[in-house]
Image: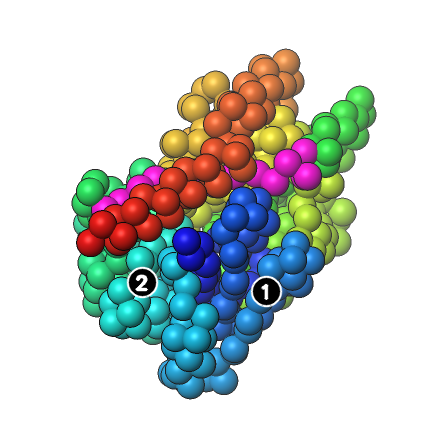
């Protein structure tokens, strides 16, 4: 039986979706022949190639460049995958016509957020009003055989029917477990870390403002803040935090693809998201939990599916700098309770977010679709 899986993605950059795609192709059973096609390059291309996966990258020269789509179609006709699994809006639109013509089962995995897509300033709008998708995303979701999201919040917000939608939470590479052991420090400043792509989606500004508020009221010796990530807003954020960096209270280290050596040295993990954007199953929060950190995050999409309020951390209103400062101060002055929250979060992570569960559930969808198409 043909068990070729073609993964099609918009980019192979440093985002959470790209990390999960790399994890899936790495640990999928060898009985499935895997191949990846991407419309954008990035560090995960080499990471997947090192896992023995064939990766094709055909970058678009401009926003509306459709020539790579024709190259993708040629590959689909020649290689004839048993299943196509797309991981982005561009990818989903590109594969939809040929999947229907060639009768190839198609899974749309582009919904990786806990709400409807939001138009970034100056970019092509792919989203819609709250309560559902509009335009091309709605079309791709309606045509797909299955829609996989990584949070129940995303499934509900995008109005995906239960007969078509499946929630599969993110997994965690077991090879990274060696990096999660906490590095306890008996002295030194209380450290907060925020990990995320530095773009319109993440609210690093609130994180910076919280650091500045703490510094103004409590001095600089007992606190330290770290911002980890890449993105087109990084230079702007560095400028905004220049005073804090100069005081040695904040830094922006270049962590590359692996943030855990930095995260495990922190005392608390923070994730603030700028509305109306919504988180799916946040890789950053999973990394905080893996390292045994209590979490402070904004009430956004799937965050409540990860963080148990008052047990593994705190969930606060978006943009609420005062609440962020309050929770950070509370954790600093209640170290025993903070450690208990971190331990509870780590146990929850080890029980619920394994790569075996992610790969197993995804494989069951593949098998189900192949059987369904064979019967028809």
Residue 56 painted magenta: no
Please state the horizontal and vertical placement of residue 371, each as a whole percent of the image. 30, 47
Front-lying residue, 75 or 168:
75
Q: Quadrant of residue 317?
A: top left
Q: Can residue 86 be seen in this view?
A: no
Secondary structure under badge 2? Answer: loop
Q: Position of residue 230 (x, y in %)?
A: 61, 59
Examine the rendering and report whether any part of residue 302 can be seen.
Answer: yes
Q: Residue at x 68, y 39 (%)?
A: 175
Residue occupying the point 29% across, 69% down: 102
Q: In this view, does 352 lie above or below 54?
A: above
Q: How crowded is mark 1: few (under 14 residues within 10 Å), some or many (20 or more)?
A: some
Q: Residue 104 carries which label?
A: 2
Residue at image mark 1: 54
| Separation (CA) of disc 2 from disc 1 | 20 Å
> Which segment did they paint magenta?
164-177
């Amino acid at each position: 039986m043909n068990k070729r899986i073609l993964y099609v993605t918009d980019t192979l950059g440093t985002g959470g979706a790209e990390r999960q795609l790399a994890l899936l192709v790495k640990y999928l059973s060898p009985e499935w022949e895997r191949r990846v096609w991407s419309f954008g390059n990035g560090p995960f291309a080499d990471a997947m190639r090192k896992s023995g996966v064939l990766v094709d990258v055909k970058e678009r020269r401009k926003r509306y460049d459709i020539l790579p789509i024709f190259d993708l179609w040629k590959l689909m006709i020649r290689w004839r995958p048993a299943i196509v699994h797309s991981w982005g809006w561009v990818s989903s639109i590109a594969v939809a016509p040929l999947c229907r013509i060639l009768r190839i089962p198609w899974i749309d995995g582009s919904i990786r957020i806990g709400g409807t897509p939001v138009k970034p300033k100056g970019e092509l709008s792919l989203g819609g009003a709250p309560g559902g998708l509009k335009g091309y995303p709605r079309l791709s979701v309606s045509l797909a055989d299955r829609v996989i999201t990584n949070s129940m919040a995303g499934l509900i917000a995008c109005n995906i029917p239960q007969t078509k939608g499946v929630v599969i939470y993110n997994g965690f590479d077991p090879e990274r477990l060696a990096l999660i052991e906490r590095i306890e420090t008996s002295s030194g400043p209380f450290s907060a870390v925020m990990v995320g792509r530095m773009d319109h989606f993440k609210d690093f500004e609130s994180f910076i403002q919280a650091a500045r508020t703490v510094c103004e009221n409590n001095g600089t010796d007992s606190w330290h803040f770290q911002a980890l990530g890449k993105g087109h807003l990084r230079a702007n954020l560095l400028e905004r935090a220049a005073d804090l960096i100069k005081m040695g209270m904040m830094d922006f280290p270049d962590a590359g693809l692996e943030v855990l050596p930095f995260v495990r040295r922190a005392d608390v993990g923070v994730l603030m998201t700028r509305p109306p954007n919504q988180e799916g199953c946040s890789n950053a929060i999973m990394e905080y939990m893996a390292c045994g950190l209590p979490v402070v995050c904004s009430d956004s999409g799937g965050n409540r599916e990860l963080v148990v309020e008052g047990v593994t951390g705190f969930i606060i209103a978006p943009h609420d700098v005062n609440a962020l400062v309050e929770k950070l101060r509370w954790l600093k002055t209640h170290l025993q309770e903070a450690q208990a929250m971190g331990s509870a979060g780590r146990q929850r992570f080890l029980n619920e977010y394994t790569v075996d569960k992610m790969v197993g559930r995804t494989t069951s969808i593949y098998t189900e679709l192949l059987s369904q198409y064979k019967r028809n």
